[in-house]
Image (tube, rainbow, N blue to C red):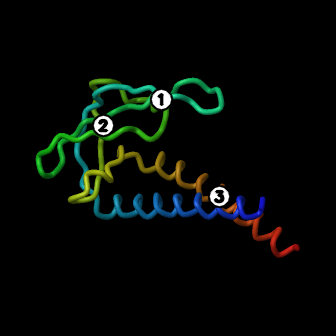
Amino acid sequence: MGLVVFLVIGLATMGYGVYEAVLHYRLRRHGIRVRGLVARRESSAGTGGSGPTQHAVVEFVDDQGHMREVRDRGTGRSGLRVAGPALVIYLPGAPGTARIDDAWRSLWRIVPVLGFGCLFTGLALWELVRR
């Protein structure tokens, strides 16, 4: 039973990591970059007793002229102050794919997720082969 849980967690995490990596590649290759404005900061409950975390919310106008918002996926991002500028990138016709344009920060979010997924999947497969 434990092996199945490890395998499912590992594969799901790897799937999410691959999705984010492909989206990151597509955004870099085909994305539209626009200037946004940090509208506010939002708090969300922290995990594991770490307390609330802060996320910047950036407003931008998409290529159709509609006002949109994107919430920073990282926490405690320095340099993004309320009423300050922020670059946003999204796929044409899909403003829901919008991310704050910071390539290195995006990669440092993807790599650990993929590593965690590979570790869990590898441990489960290793244990299955060993039995």
Pointer 1 or 2: first along the chain: 1
Query: Where 126 falls versus 13 (above or below)?
Result: below
Query: Where 61 falls versus 131 (above or below)?
Result: above
Label total for image: 3
Return the x and y of residue 38 as percentages of the image width and height.
Answer: 30, 30
Q: Residue 86 carries which label?
A: 2
Amino acid type shown at disc 1: Ser
Return the x and y of residue 8 as percentages of the image width and height.
Answer: 65, 62
Horizontal arrangement in the rendering, residue 1 relative to residue 82 (left or right): right
Pointer 3 or 1: first along the chain: 3
Q: Which mark is residue 123?
A: none
Q: Residue furthest front?
A: 1
Camera-side mark, 3 or 2: 3
Amino acid type shown at disc 3: Ile
Badge 2: residue crowd in 10 Å (few <14, some 14–19, many ≥20): many
Nearer-the-camera pick, 118 or 81: 118
Judged from the image, the secondary structure of the residue bearing numbered disc 3 is helix
Pointer 3 or 2: first along the chain: 3
Horizontal arrangement in the rendering, residue 60 relative to residue 55 (left or right): left
Residue that mark 3 sits on: 9
Please name the residue shown 29% across and 53% down the image: 90
Q: In which quarter of the image is residue 22?
A: bottom left
Q: Which mark is residue 44?
A: 1
Q: Split into 4 quadrants, where in the image is the N terminus?
A: bottom right
Please name the residue shown 82% across and 75% down the image: 129
Badge 1: residue crowd in 10 Å (few <14, some 14–19, many ≥20): few
Nearer-the-camera pick, 126 or 103: 126
Q: Split into 4 quadrants, where in the image is the C terminus?
A: bottom right
Amino acid type shown at disc 2: Ala
Q: How far apart are marks 1 and 2 (CA)?
A: 21 Å
